[in-house]
Image: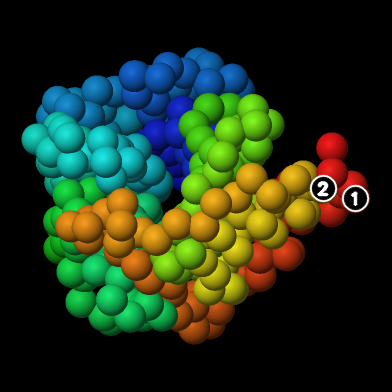
Amino acid sequence: MSRVLITGISGFIGGHIWAQLAHSEDLWGLYGATGSVPLKPERQLGCDLSQPDNIYHLIKDLKPTHVVHLAGMARPELCRRNSLLAWKVNHAATRELAAAAAEIDARVIFISSDQVFDGTRGNYREGDPPEPVNVYGETKKAAERVVLAQVDNSVVLRLNITYGPPRFKGGSFSEWILDRERSGQPISLFFDQYRSPLDIVTATRAIVELIDHRFQGVLHLGGANRVNRVTFGRMLLKHLGRDASGILETQSTKTDPEGTMPVDTSFDLTLARQTLHTPIANLMEGLRLAYGPPRSGIV
């Protein structure tokens, strides 16, 4: 019988995975400083990843057959300001997790990021060399290497920017836009930053599928459309019948002269389409999956 451990269940993606798998009999979840979440509270454990040994001993005690590792520091600016902590949480804790998983022969699904690329050309494939331009990307690159080196049965799943409402806690790019629109604040979005935005429903389905999948190695997952942030914001607000006039187009190089945010981290999704049964939604389909049918009128 499978025993599945999900780390980071109090985060945006982790909360959705936890809810999706809540029916599973032998399911365990780890949460961090933001606390526990509803559903199966008796199967949740707190874990401080700034003390990397904690995750090693916890996995050795639980002996999961599958580990989905979502926990970490995911905001690039926060990682830049707290680089030592970011290296402990994102890299050292993942190293200890991988070591423990290897000892008990557990399968590991490690959730990584498009930020491992420098963004100079976009349309990245799995074989393209990671060249991060920020601390967050560096920690993820290093964590990827230890997982692939230590755990034979492992997947490094690089996710592009993911959107949708939270299931319990955490936030997303789309929710940031909606919060500002609701409060009447200006919404400054970059017209020169391109991503492959991925809806949370597709992301959740794909991660759950990979738990018992035979695939091993690196896999890219994003939405089917390469768009800039302005286009995404306008499509989101239009889909929800909201007013998009508050969107201000800005240039990323003016606010980020040091180039710490990659310009184009869009993904080539050929391998994902060949590997997964989960359909990869385009932006219109993804908005429908995440937020329901289109709404009419500005409210």
Tag 1 secondary structure = loop
Query: In the image, 168: left or right of 5?
Result: right
In the displayed structure image, the side of residue 257 where residue 178 appears, left or right: right
Q: x%, y% of residue 130?
A: 21, 70
Judged from the image, the secondary structure of the residue bearing numbered disc 2 is loop
Q: Quadrant of residue 263?
A: bottom left
Residue at the spot x=46%, y=28% of the render?
10
Q: Which mark is first along the chain, 2 or 1? A: 2
Does 55 appear above or below 218? above
Amino acid under disc 2:
Gly
Q: Which dot marks residue 241?
A: 2
Residue 101 is left or right of residue 1, and the answer is left
Between 51 and 296, the residue placed more toward the observer is: 296
Q: Residues within 10 Å of mark 1 (few under 14, many from 20)?
A: few
Q: For residue 145, what is the image quadrant?
A: bottom left
Q: Dot 2, crowdedness within 10 Å: few (<14), some or many (≥20)?
A: some
Give the percent coordinates (x, y) of residue 251.
Answer: 39, 61
**Residue at coordinates 69% horizontally, 49% vertically from top-left?**
245
Q: Distance between the Cα atoms at labels 1 and 2?
A: 5 Å
Considering only vertical position in the picture, is 174 above or below 155? above
| Amino acid marked by disc 1 | Ser
Name the foreground residue: 65 vs 237. 237
Q: Is residue 30 visible?
A: yes
Viewer-nearest residue: 137 or 92: 137
Task: From this view, report whether residue 227 is shown above or below residue 46.
Answer: below
Residue holding disc 1: 296
